[in-house]
């Protein structure tokens, strides 16, 4: 049976209440269905057959929400324009890994403090939400080894 947004979220208001990044998970789930391959197109995803099962008064708003979720997926690298086309998309390797709320939450959390914003000495330890370090590694004055969370406000660590 073909997956549709309606098969995942029947209530139109529930769709409209979702933020673009929250709607992205059900949307990419629908786009992964081989029967929906024609929807991987910037024109086709905006057609009314995508939202035909929802009540008519909600259809335009749901299409707008779908477009916002599409843009979030594209910006996040979950979908990308196919080579040699101008409107056809494919699901990227990152998009194929987006399968559940936990994966989505992990991606969203990683975006809160991108690795590019970390000081190089801190970034070398990875990008978890809390990087365990030793103060001795960053300050020659300290004789004690301390572990804890590094925050950007902890200026004594960046010297």
Image (tube, rainbow, N blue to C red):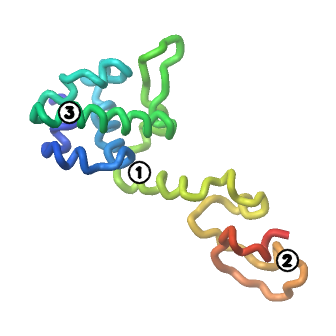
Quarter of the rendering containing residue 70 = top left
Single out the residue that lies furthest toward the right. 140
What's the CA distance linking mark 2 and mark 3?
56 Å
Q: Position of residue 1 (x, y in %)?
A: 15, 30
The residue that label 3 is drawn on is 4
User: Image point 73% across, 64% down: which residue?
Assistant: 122
Which label is found at residue 28?
A: none
What's the CA distance linking mark 2 and mark 1?
37 Å
The residue that label 2 is drawn on is 139
Quarter containing the C terminus: bottom right
Q: Secondary structure at mark 1?
A: helix
Quarter of the rendering containing residue 117 = bottom right
User: Image point 37% across, 37% down: which residue?
Assistant: 68
Q: Are marks 3 and 1 in contact (CB under 8 Å)?
A: no
* Vertical placement of residue 11 versus 93, above or below: below
Answer left or right for 31 relative to 113: left
Answer left or right for 73 relative to 25: right
What's the CA distance linking mark 3 and mark 1?
20 Å
Q: Position of residue 91 (x, y in %)?
A: 43, 30
Disc 3 residue crowd, few under 14, some 14–19, many 20+, Cα 10 Å? many
Q: Position of residue 126 (x, y in %)?
A: 66, 59
The residue that label 1 is drawn on is 104
């Amino acid at each position: 049976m073909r997956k549709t947004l309606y098969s995942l979220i029947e209530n139109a208001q529930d769709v409209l209440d979702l933020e673009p990044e929250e709607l992205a998970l059900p949307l990419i789930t629908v786009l992964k269905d081989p029967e929906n391959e024609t929807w991987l197109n910037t024109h086709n995803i905006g057609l009314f057959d995508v939202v035909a099962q929802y009540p008519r008064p909600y259809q335009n708003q749901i299409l707008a929400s779908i477009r916002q979720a599409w843009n979030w997926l594209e910006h996040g690298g979950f979908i990308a324009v196919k080579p040699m086309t101008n409107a056809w998309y494919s699901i990227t390797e990152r998009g194929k890994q987006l399968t559940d709320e936990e994966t989505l939450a992990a991606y969203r959390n990683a975006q809160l403090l991108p690795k590019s914003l970390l000081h190089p000495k801190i970034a070398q330890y990875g990008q978890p939400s809390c990087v365990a370090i030793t103060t001795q590694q960053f300050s020659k004055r300290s004789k004690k080894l301390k572990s804890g969370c590094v925050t950007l406000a902890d200026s004594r660590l960046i010297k």
